[in-house]
Image (cartoon, grey):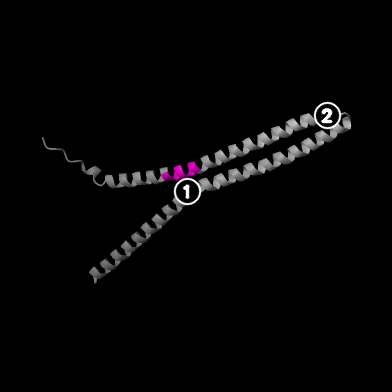
Amino acid sequence: MPAKAPPPAFDGALLPLGAFMQMGSRNMEMLAEAGQEMTASMRKAGQTLSEFFGERLKKDVETARKLSECRTPDEVWRVQCAFFEDAVADYSKEAVDMIEIASAAAVGAAQPVEKATEDALRSLSDAGEKARAGVQKAVRETAQAAS
């Protein structure tokens, strides 16, 4: 029994499917690049936080030791004031560091998307230029045929 020919509705269907798959492949590459950047940034943030909390714990323990040695309310007051001033400075600096890491992560993750957008716009511009040239050629040929 001879093989059935595909119905005419499927003529040329493989070309759009190929373009669709190529686009999907580019998108997956873009997402992978963005994911790598986010993963690296999350790792850096985790390491930074771990180091920060380790240092803060040492300072907290040192403050407890100093408080245990205090003999007057004035000494307790000075140790507590120094502790809170130091803690506020440390937590403020850590907040700035975390914001910088998050900002760098956002910019880094956006770069593959930005590149893909530029590539897509360039491709559209090229396609538009080819279409314009094709229309101009058709108009010239039509004008020549009419004369």
**Residue at numbered disc 1:** 112
The Cα–Cα distance between marks 1 and 2, rounded to whole angstroms, is 57 Å
Instruction: Please state the extent of the stretch shown in magenta in the rendering.
Output: 29-36
State which mark lies toward you, 1 or 2.
Answer: 2
Residue 5 lies left or right of residue 130; in this view the side is left
Vertical order, 59 against 129 (above or below): above
Number of the label disc, if any, that sits on residue 32: none
The local crowd at label 1, few if under 14, some if 14 to 19, many if 20 or more residues have their Cα within 10 Å, is many
- Answer left or right for 112 relative to 13: right
User: Which of the 4 image quadrants contains residue 105?
Assistant: top right
**Front residue (pair 102, 93):** 93
Residue 62 image-quadrant placement? top right
| Whether residue 12 is situated above or below residue 57 in the rendered picture | below
Residue on which the image places disc 2: 69
Indicate the amino acid at tag 2: Glu
* Secondary element type, mark 2: helix
Residue 100: x percent and y percent?
62, 45
Residue, far top: 68
